[in-house]
Image (cartoon, rainbow, N blue to C red):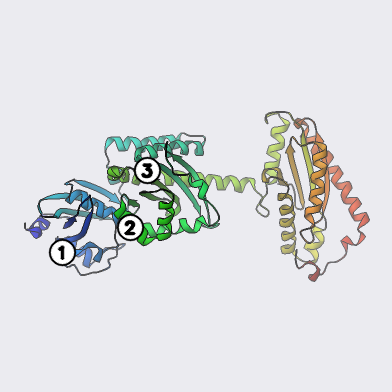
């Protein structure tokens, strides 16, 4: 067969690929047998955004002489050359800043155990939405359903649980999961996951600990070393995972994983996390890849928007210095109680905690020390109360509002505040509390707690006349 003539018959960048067929669905060497001028130029004079390991094209060379080993490319070559499938894919490899529009066509006849296909590609600097959406009707329907569910939801997390179950079913997998990563805090969080019935796999949530981020952080290099995703469908592919990331391989296999699909989730080029499927239907890997490539594009956008909304919500409700709730959130809570929007009319406890001596610290030591004193005051309260109950009501004043707390418990909590404050040098509170039997009387509780706090402050300064004296920087160094 004249492979060069076949390549030269294509105007687009095209080469002939040979695949060594082995027993039991395995394959050996994959070689670039011949290429037309356009393809050879793409190797020897790479377009911007692409790089080659070797810039001299030599016929019948292994493809890994030119690019890093790519399991997805190998799978498509095998399916086209050996299984005689016509295949198309449109991908954005993480290792390159371009999009590849690829077509694989089988060739006849085979040469013993050596099988052939053509590989034609087009390189795009920007994503082509027409190519991205060029999938079959049933796949388009599945992707569209995902988008519609997320767009129409008022409960994002609940809807994501539905979506991940749909993806698990589509993949025929035992386990599917979306894992979010906070690269600044170096933490991981499971957004949603689903297990099939009668599986021995466990929820990923049970494996998440302080060290898991280190493992998840290693996945990016494992994926970038290949393509835009990782699809390890059998023992041969899993050996590549073992070679690239032995720690992760051991983690997967020890948990009962036999194969895995892993796609990064990105929004505006920022890595948000990953979606994966374990013990999936390997025979359906092409369909799974096509569907998840577009689904993850949608999911990345939706998750990114949801995280942005959460961050904006936090910015609008949190005090930026201390991290506790701000005055605006306190006013919203009080209004909802006062008007009866909050369900139930159980008792409500209010505690006002006012820092003693903040002005002196600011005047005599500096505002940085004063800010640290305020942060330590908030830390004291966070040791005792839930974040959602603590509000920075003013510069040096905090309010704690708790529904269902009785008088005796409130008094005990006030004593706890005094005890815990001793852990932080310089932290001293004037405290006042009040319990009302009906939460709609929260404004009365606020007024009485405030009055009692000021009485406590007067008593504090009466019994500590030296509290207003000048402080030296040396006395305050640990605050």
Residue positioned 21% across, 53% down in the render: 77
Residue depicted at 91% across the width and 51% down the height: 459
* Location of residue 130 (image quadrant): top left
* Label 1 crowd bin: few (<14), some (14–19), many (20+), radius 10 Å: some
Between 260 and 478, the residue placed more toward the observer is 260
Q: Secondary structure at mark 2?
A: helix
- Residue 383 visible at all: yes
Task: Choose mark 1 or mark 3, whichever is in front.
Answer: 1
Q: Name the residue carrying label 2.
A: 239
Query: Residue at 91% across / 58% down in the picture?
Result: 464
Which mark lies nearer to you, 2 or 1?
2
Whole-percent x and y of residue 163? 43, 38
- Sequence-wise, the earlier of marks 2 and 3 is 2
Horizontally, is 389 left or right of 299 in the view?
A: right
User: Could you give the CA–CA distance between mark 2 and mark 3, rounded to whole angstroms?
Assistant: 27 Å
Q: CA distance from mark 2 to mark 1?
A: 25 Å
Tell me the crowding category of disc 3: few under 14, some 14 to 19, or many 20 or more residues within 10 angstroms, Cα based: many
* Residue under pointer 3: 295
Q: Which residue is mark 1?
A: 60
Sequence order check, earlier mark of 1 and 3: 1
Give the image location of residue 262, x and y in percent.
38, 50
Mark 1 near mark 3, Cβ–Cβ under 8 Å?
Answer: no
| Label 1 to label 3: alpha-carbon separation | 37 Å
Label 2 neighbourhood size at 10 Å, few (<14), some (14-19), many (20+)?
some
Q: Nearer the viewer, residue 114 or 264?
A: 114
């Amino acid at each position: 067969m004249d492979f060069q003539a076949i390549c030269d018959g294509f105007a687009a960048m095209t080469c002939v690929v040979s695949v060594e067929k082995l027993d039991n669905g395995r394959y050996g060497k994959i070689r670039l047998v011949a290429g037309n001028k356009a393809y050879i130029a793409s190797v020897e004079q790479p377009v911007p955004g692409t790089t080659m390991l070797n810039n001299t094209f030599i016929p019948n060379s292994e493809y890994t002489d030119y690019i890093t080993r790519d399991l997805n490319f190998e799978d498509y070559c095998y399916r086209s050359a050996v299984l005689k499938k016509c295949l198309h894919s449109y991908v954005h490899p993480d290792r390159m800043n371009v999009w590849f529009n690829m077509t694989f066509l089988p060739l006849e006849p085979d040469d013993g155990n050596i099988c052939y296909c053509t590989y034609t590609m087009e390189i795009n600097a920007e994503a082509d939405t027409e190519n991205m959406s060029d999938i079959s009707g049933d796949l388009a329907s599945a992707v569209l359903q995902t988008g519609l569910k997320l767009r129409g939801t008022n409960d994002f997390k609940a809807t994501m649980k539905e979506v991940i179950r749909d993806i698990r079913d589509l993949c025929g997998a035992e386990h599917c999961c979306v894992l979010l990563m906070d690269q600044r805090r170096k933490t991981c969080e499971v957004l949603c996951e689903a297990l099939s019935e009668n599986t021995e796999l466990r929820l990923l949530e049970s494996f998440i600990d302080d060290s898991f981020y280190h493992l998840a952080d290693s996945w990016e290099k494992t994926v970038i070393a290949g393509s835009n995703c990782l699809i390890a469908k059998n023992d041969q592919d899993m050996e590549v995972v073992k070679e690239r990331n032995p720690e992760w391989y051991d983690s997967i296999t020890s948990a009962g994983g036999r194969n895995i699909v892993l796609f990064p989730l990105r929004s505006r080029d920022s890595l948000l996390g990953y979606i994966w499927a374990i013990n999936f239907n390997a025979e359906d890997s092409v369909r799974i890849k096509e569907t998840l490539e577009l689904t993850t594009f949608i999911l990345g956008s939706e998750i990114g928007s949801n995280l942005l909304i959460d961050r904006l919500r936090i910015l609008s409700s949190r005090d930026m210095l201390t991290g506790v709730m701000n005055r605006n959130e306190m006013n919203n809570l009080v209004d909802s109680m006062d008007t009866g929007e909050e369900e139930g009319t159980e008792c409500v406890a209010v505690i006002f905690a006012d820092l003693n001596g903040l002005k002196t610290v600011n005047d005599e030591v500096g505002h940085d020390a004063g800010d640290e004193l305020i942060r330590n005051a908030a830390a004291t309260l966070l040791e005792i109360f839930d974040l959602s109950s603590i509000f920075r009501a003013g510069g040096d004043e905090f309010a704690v509002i708790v529904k269902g707390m009785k008088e005796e418990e409130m008094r005990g909590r006030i004593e706890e505040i005094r005890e815990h404050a001793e852990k932080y040098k310089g932290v001293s509170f004037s405290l006042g509390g009040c319990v009302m039997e009906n939460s709609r009387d929260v404004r009365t509780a606020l007024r009485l707690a405030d009055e009692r706090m000021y009485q406590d402050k007067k008593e504090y300064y009466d019994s500590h006349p030296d509290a207003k004296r000048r402080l030296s920087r040396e006395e305050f160094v640990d605050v």
